[in-house]
Amino acid sequence: MPELPSGTVTFLFTDIEGSTRLLHELGPEPYADKLAEHRAVLREAFSSHGGVEVDTQGDAFFVAFPTAPGALAAACEAQEALAIPVRMGLHTGTPLLTGEGYVGADIHRAARIAAAGHGGQVLISASTAALIDASNSLLLDLGEHRLKDLSAPEQLYQVGDGEFPRLKTLYQTNLPVPATAFLGREQELAEVAGLLTADGSRLLTLTGPGGTGKTRLALQAAAESADHFPDGVWWVPLAALRDAAVVLPTVAVALGTREEPGRSLQDALRTALAGRRALLLLDNAEHLLPGFAEQLSALRAIDGPSILVTSRERLQLQGEHVYAVAPLEEHDAVRLFLERSAALGVRLERSPAVAELCRRLDELPLALELAAARTPLFSVAQLLERLGGRLDLLKGGRDADPRQQTLRATIAWSYELLSEEERLLFRRLSVFPAGCSLERAESVCEADPDTLQSLLDKSLVRRRDTQSGPRFWMLETIREYAAEQLEESGERSTVEDRLIDAACEFARAAEPEWRLGNTDEWSGRFDLERDNLRSAIAAALERGDAERALTIAAYLGWLWQERGLMREGIDWTERGLAAADELEPALEGLALLVLGVGHNELGELDRSKELLEQCLPLLEAGGLPHHHAFALYYLGGHFLRLERVAEAEAIFRQSEDEALSLGDPTLIQAATAGLAEAFAARGDRVSARALLEKLDPVPTLQHRMTLAVQLAELLAVDGETATAESLLDHARATCEQHGYRRELAWILLLRGYLDVAAGRRDVAVAALEAARAIGEESGVRGVVRGALLGLAAAEACWGSPEAAVALWSKARALGFASREDSWYFSRKLERELLEPLRDTVPKESFERAWTSGAAEVR
């Protein structure tokens, strides 16, 4: 066998697409002939361009080339000569070459690239494309794709301009990118994937002690099964939760589903998931039992999605399929140990000593990783001697599962080898259930970078990159041990106190950002810190520190709303208020404002009005003028709803005066919009238009776009349709240019209404569908409802009356009377095009369509 190339190597993987089907079509003997011909063609092409055959299994080849152009030339030559559909994938990297072959993630990446393609298709990675002269081949950029090895997105290229189906890559998913490649467990992976995709299997629980690799197996099985779940695969981490009641809100956040007025979160999840072929992976559920089982019942009642759970014990639910995750087989355990050691620059060979070490560690993946992390310091013989004695000592007196004893002993051994500085930081980092930035590690745990790096090197701490920079975190099993050590050290109270201070600092910094339009940036930060913030609030309440608990909960008010967690924000805020003896007016007023806005957003309007009236004097006394103006705006909306127009107008005027004196763009826009709405409500559209046309007081472009929609409607109502459409088209272009998605949704909605009224079918439907998509994506219920109403009107004009009824019913079922319902054109379309359907559609057909539409929401 020729010597394997080393250094920079290009890997080529091939296999026959649909080989089983081809075998059945041709029969055994003709298929064997075709297979032999196929192998001969490939080997000829590979050898003529310097390729070395690394492995061959069935119809699949794994070949290494010293150059990327040679690999590409071989692939193209082979494809031209082949008579059966073969898919190929190329990737270039710098793998480790050992006596037993190549080691490293590049091999797995190349195999995954090949598996993503179709027969006759050649895919190459960005690293390979960078080494190829583009003039010698036609490379079609296919964009970024997530491969099923759960690696970071890979830029893929296709050789040639052939047309093929969509690549077999991940889409509609939030599955995380693991720190290391998935190794071994081929049989277990196939079995779990088979259970996930089997008919009638809607709940599967992977069980086993910590450290057995339940999460990693579940993630990989979910990725492998993605083609079976076209409506998405969603990962919901539960380890950081303290209360089972937060499970459904956490699922909703993962799905992008929001709490909405007039309906429960369970109903919102039903709308998002009913009839959908989706998979929910609920990870690390054991500490939430038995309450978790009740929460899960609500999800299981939704007809459609499948659920995969990881837990140290089964859930004991009817219809639950349980799969016990066993330790690795010896071959895979040794391979994992060797690859993790190689990643640290320690090249080891298979040996009886390595096999014995893996056996002593019960072939547990996490224990093997911790042992491998020590190979730069200890030889395998030293590891056996030192770790073996520790295992015997700690396993002796425990009644737990032997594998759990092994893992705990391994973590304890790793901990005891740390320096005092490393131990101190290790146990302090356990206060962060969601991990932390370097800055937070420094402020809360007094970390220094060198010590943190040392814990990373020893696999006790992990790192992931985010849009906000690197985050440092622990596997939950390790964090549990670290938390025990923190408790025993007697310093938990001190470190938690710093965590609470950090959470207060975060909340105070976040609070004014909504007025500056920085919602996307801070929503992303909140998502990263959410579980740390929850932990800080809970810790403050546990120690009777209601003031700091309330500070965190109340100053996070708009973020609870923005991320669809308003009910949770209300709960934390109410608990803080209930626990407080006496508060400063500013904090109490802010808390009542958060509750007032929250109950308003959830449709609990009478309670909202009561709270807003209570908060006003406190906000004034506490010196919070921005919040006072904001409370007035919401209160004006309540008076408008009660048709007390004069009082609403007076309140909006006061809100606008205060906003203008503060120069606050968000408040100016809100107050101006409210005042114009009050003018229109009393029939003075001239004044409303004049107010909206004077856009100069609103200093930010984004807020002007919101007011432009109101002005366009008034123009259209007054018969100036061309001017209204021109204004909307200009606003649409501005929003698309600057990425103002929510403002764009309202613009598209009104434009769609005007197009329906003008008889422009295609452009109307396109605008309304686009508005609906943005509304669903961003959780703006009013847009979704309005778009459905417009689409129903379009069906009534040009399509099926029954379809129009179903869409109309669906819009109504979303229902809670909000401001878009006062739009002139929505009322006009409903009155002139939809209401007549009650008389023109046969009663039985009408009722069937109406029931069908409403059922989609429930």
Image (cartoon, grey):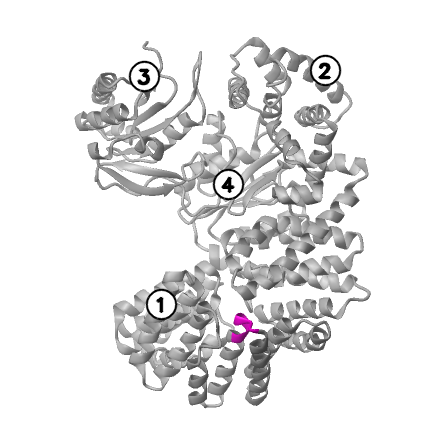
**Image-based side of 791 in relation to 349, left or right:** left
Number of numbered markers: 4
Q: Earlier in the sequence, mark 3 or mark 1?
A: 3
Numbered disc 4: secondary structure:
loop
Which quadrant is home to the N terminus? Answer: top left
The Cα–Cα distance between marks 4 and 3, rounded to whole angstroms, is 33 Å
Disc 3 packing (10 Å; few <14; some 14–19; many ≥20): some
Residue 76 sits above or below residue 498 on the image: above
Numbered disc 2: secondary structure:
helix
Q: Main secondary structure of the magenta part?
A: helix
Q: Which residue corresponds to mark 1?
A: 732
Q: Which residue corresponds to mark 2?
A: 389
**Image-based side of 431 in relation to 713, left or right:** right
How far across and how far down the image is residue 345, in percent? 52, 20
Numbered disc 3: secondary structure:
strand
Q: Which residue corresponds to mark 4?
A: 176
Q: Earlier in the sequence, mark 3 or mark 2?
A: 3
Disc 4 packing (10 Å; few <14; some 14–19; many ≥20): few
Q: Is residue 665 magenta?
A: yes
Q: State if disc 1 and disc 3 touch (CB < 8 Å).
A: no
- Picture quarter containing residue 671? bottom right
The Cα–Cα distance between marks 3 and 2, rounded to whole angstroms, is 44 Å
- Picture quarter containing residue 835? bottom left
Amino acid on which disc 1 is placed:
Arg
The Cα–Cα distance between marks 4 and 2, rounded to whole angstroms, is 37 Å
Q: Which residues are magenta?
A: 663-668
Q: Is residue 770 or residue 706 the one in the foreground?
A: 706
Q: State if disc 3 and disc 4 touch (CB < 8 Å).
A: no
**Image-based side of 67 in relation to 415, left or right:** left
